[in-house]
């Protein structure tokens, strides 16, 4: 099956097929053998070309928020036969609303920005401690911090809203 996958506003051509319990995936022509298991609460265990990683996936209206190794990515899937033409200039240049959510259960260690601050794409926003590791949550675009919805040292659950950026 062929799909276009957009990860953080960069588009990839993806083909995949299931055969004998293994999924073969080609991303822009580069091939991978993938075995993935969905665990509870949006967590997934993935083995790709003999490399293991864990991912957290949550649905965000028409896209997905995917967290791998502490990095949050916005992922959209499109069937090329049904995709409507889009105005790429609007998608890549404009300021958009971001709702920063907890990718996993943990404790808010500190904020790297405050209400009213302007943030850039990729800028660190919040440090979240989970399983004795500190994870930096980053902005996925430009904007201004409109609201901080939690406090330092507060314990949060997966998908809980932490911050709003517009």
Image (spheres, rainbow, N blue to C red):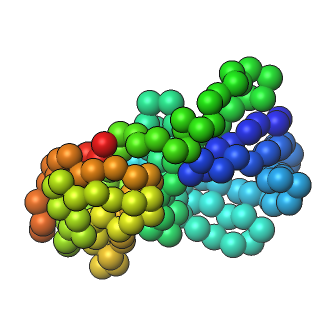
Residue at 74%, 57% in the rendered image: 34
Residue at 83%, 35% in the rendered image: 1
Front residue of this view, candidates 157 and 151? 151
Q: Is residue 162 visible in this depiction of the protein?
A: no
From the top left corner, tell me how far across and down residue 143 is, in percent: 34, 50
Front residue of this view, candidates 130 and 77? 77
From the top left corner, tell me how far across and down residue 144 is, in percent: 27, 50
Front residue of this view, candidates 97 and 63? 97
Occupied quadrant, residue 112? bottom left
Q: Horizontal placement of 66 versus 131: left or right?
A: right
Residue at 40%, 40% in the rendered image: 96
Q: Horizontal placement of 91 versus 1: left or right?
A: left
Residue at 62%, 30% in the rendered image: 87
Residue closest to the far bottom = 132
> Vertical placement of 39 versus 89: above or below?
below
Q: Is residue 138 visible in this depiction of the protein?
A: yes
Front residue of this view, candidates 141 and 74? 141
> Vertical placement of 99 versus 55: above or below?
above
From the top left corner, tell me how far across and down residue 92 is, in percent: 55, 44
From the top left corner, tell me how far across and down residue 85 is, in percent: 70, 24
How many marks overall? Answer: 0
Quadrant into which the C terminus falls: top left
């Amino acid at each position: 099956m062929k799909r276009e996958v957009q990860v953080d506003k960069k588009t990839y051509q993806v083909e995949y097929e299931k055969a004998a319990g293994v999924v073969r995936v080609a991303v822009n022509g580069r091939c991978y053998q993938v075995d993935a298991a969905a665990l509870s609460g949006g967590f997934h265990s993935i083995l790709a070309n003999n490399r293991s990683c864990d991912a957290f996936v949550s649905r965000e209206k028409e896209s997905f928020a995917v967290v791998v190794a502490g990095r949050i990515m916005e992922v959209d899937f499109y069937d090329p036969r049904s995709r409507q033409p889009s105005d790429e200039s609007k998608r890549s240049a404009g300021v958009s609303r971001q709702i920063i959510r907890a990718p996993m259960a943990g404790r808010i260690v500190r904020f790297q920005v405050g209400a009213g601050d302007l943030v850039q794409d990729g800028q660190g926003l919040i440090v979240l401690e989970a399983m004795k590791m500190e994870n930096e949550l980053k902005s996925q675009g430009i904007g201004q911090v409109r609201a901080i919805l939690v406090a330092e040292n507060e314990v949060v659950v997966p998908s809980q809203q932490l911050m709003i950026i517009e």
